[in-house]
Amino acid sequence: MSSKGDSGKTYHLECSGAALETANAHSSAKGITLFGSCFCPFVHRVWVALEYLGIDYKYYEVDPYKKPQELLELSPKGLVPALKLHTYEPPRALNESTVILDFLEDLAATTTKRSLLPPISNPYSRALVRLQADHINRTLVPAFYRYLQAQDEEKQVQGAKDYVQAIKTLTELFDRTAREGDRSVGLWNPDGSLSLADVMAVPWLFRATNVLVHYRGFVPLEGGRYRAYLDRLLSHPAVRGTSSTDELYIDSYERYAYNRPNTSQVANAINSGSGLP
């Protein structure tokens, strides 16, 4: 853990760096409004998908801890991300990042013709990518928070092991898809395109390079293939353009690193051992 101790920093309320430029470029009214928060990884995955799929949208920053009424009307728990769909009368809403990603994939199929999955004519390859995505949600994401929120050294060591194992298992699933499925989808392959699993994982793989390094002294996995994959992923225009500066994440995640009470519904779920909200 950082030797400076809990300084009381709180979460940011505005994007920075490339993400701020992208947010500003999407500040006018569109058919879809993304209600987001600059530090939220669940928002990040949806934002990456919107950029990659080429779906036009408005980015609207909200404070999910203040839970404005306009957010509660879209998301019953007051959680981001949430979408407001203005093409319906009256407007309709969607919440939950995985549901939103499925919606955007279907929407793009009839509009921009871009996809995060192999062709529908190859259902087995699509299923392999969904297996990767399932592992990310069930294992990698909770492992990240358990590692970051652990306060004693023994639990931090175990947290590091569990998080590294989650990444290794993901790379094994990538290898399986490379052997058995469509190699053209997924950045694990140097010539592949961005996949659903890449989008699902990137917020936490990215935060491991700043938040986990800063607060836990995390040493990113060595090895040419994973390092090359991570470089391709983090340098992808859709990822780079929706990522703020390291400082924003380090400040915003201090709450998690010192496991402050009621940091978030996610943090509470990890502390109680229950499923993520």
Image (cartoon, rainbow, N blue to C red):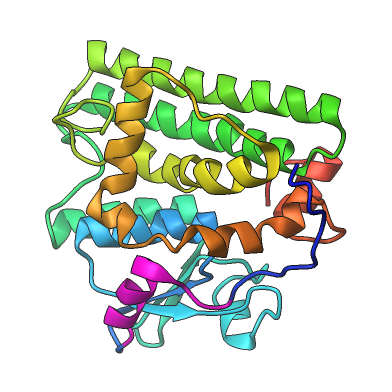
Q: Position of residue 105 (x, y in %)?
A: 28, 52
Tell me which corner region of the image, top left, top right, bottom left or bottom right, holds residue 21. bottom left
Left or right: 177 with respect to 252?
Answer: left
- Name the residue located 54 percent from the left edge and 75 percent from the top edge: 74
What count of labels does the image hold? 0
Establish if 65 lies above or below 277: below
What secondary structure is the stretch in magenta mostly built from?
helix
Establish if 202 lies above or below 71: above
Out of 247 and 145, give the one closest to the viewer.
247
- Residue reaching furthest to the front: 3
Establish if 3 lies above or below 37: above
Q: Position of residue 125 (x, y in %)?
A: 25, 24
- Name the residue located 38 percent from the left edge and 74 percent from the top edge: 20
Whether the magenta-drawn stretch holds residue 23 is answered as yes
* Residue 233 visible in the picture: yes
Q: Position of residue 6 (x, y in %)?
A: 82, 58
The span picked out in magenta is 13-27
Out of 111 and 15, give the one closest to the viewer.
15
Out of 4 and 263, give the one closest to the viewer.
4
- Name the residue located 63 percent from the left edge and 46 percent from the top edge: 214
Whether the magenta-drawn stretch holds residue 33 is answered as no
Left or right: 57 with respect to 111?
Answer: right
Name the image quarter holding the N terminus: top right
- Residue reaching furthest to the top: 179
Left or right: 94 with respect to 108?
Answer: right
Tell me which corner region of the image, top left, top right, bottom left or bottom right, holds residue 263. bottom right
Establish if 70 lies above or below 17: below
* Residue 96 visible in the picture: no
- Name the residue located 83 percent from the left edge and 61 percent from the top edge: 262
Q: Position of residue 205 (x, y in %)?
A: 48, 40
